[in-house]
Image (tube, rainbow, N blue to C red):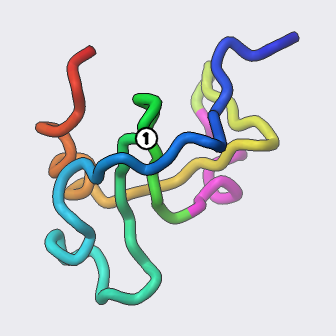
Amino acid sequence: MARPWEADPSATLARRLGKSPLELGNTTGDDDCPDIWELDNGDFAVVGRDLTAAYTARLPQGMAISADERLVVIPRSTLLSAKADIPGE
């Protein structure tokens, strides 16, 4: 059965939502950069720590992670910073 939504790998990163990881103090400027970006097709890309293995055995009812998906964790400050930039529709 086809999924109702599929990620488009050809979509490009259009704009950062919220402040940069450096502005939020969530990185030292190395390769650890939690971030949220809006794609040119309206979808969102989230960069965070892959904690799929840590959470898989304790997912709440109704939540699932497919083989081609990952559960990523981002700092609270990253999401709160992005709130004003997330469109309502």
Residue drawn 30% across the image and 49% down it: 15
Residue at the spot of label 1? 39
Tell me where the magenta segment starts and ends, as one range. 50-59
The image shows residue 63, relative to residue 47, as above or below, that is above
Magenta highlight on residue 36 = no
The image shows residue 86, relative to residue 51, as above or below, that is above
Residue drawn 30% across the image and 88% down it: 28
Q: Quadrant of the C terminus?
A: top left
Residue drawn 32% across the image and 87% down it: 29
Total marks shown come to 1
Magenta segment main secondary structure: helix
Q: Amino acid at mark 1?
A: Leu
Indicate the position of residue 38 as horizontal and vertical percent values.
36, 41
Residue drawn 52% across the image and 53% down it: 72
Q: Quadrant of the N terminus?
A: top right
Indicate the position of residue 43 as horizontal and vertical percent values.
45, 32
Horizontally, residue 80 falls left or right of residue 8, namely: left
Horizontally, residue 51 falls left or right of residue 89, namely: right
Quadrant of the rendered structure where residue 8 is?
Answer: top right
Magenta highlight on residue 54 = yes
Query: Which SS class for mark 1?
Result: strand
> What is the crowding at mark 1: few (fewer than 14 residues within 10 Å), some, or many (at least 20)?
some
Indicate the position of residue 46 as horizontal and vertical percent values.
45, 50
Between 77 and 29, the residue placed more toward the observer is 29
> For the view shown, which residue lies furthest in the right direction?
1
Horizontally, residue 51 falls left or right of residue 68, namely: left
Between 8 and 3, the residue placed more toward the observer is 8
Quadrant of the rendered structure where residue 24 is?
Answer: bottom left
Indicate the position of residue 81 as horizontal and vertical percent values.
16, 51
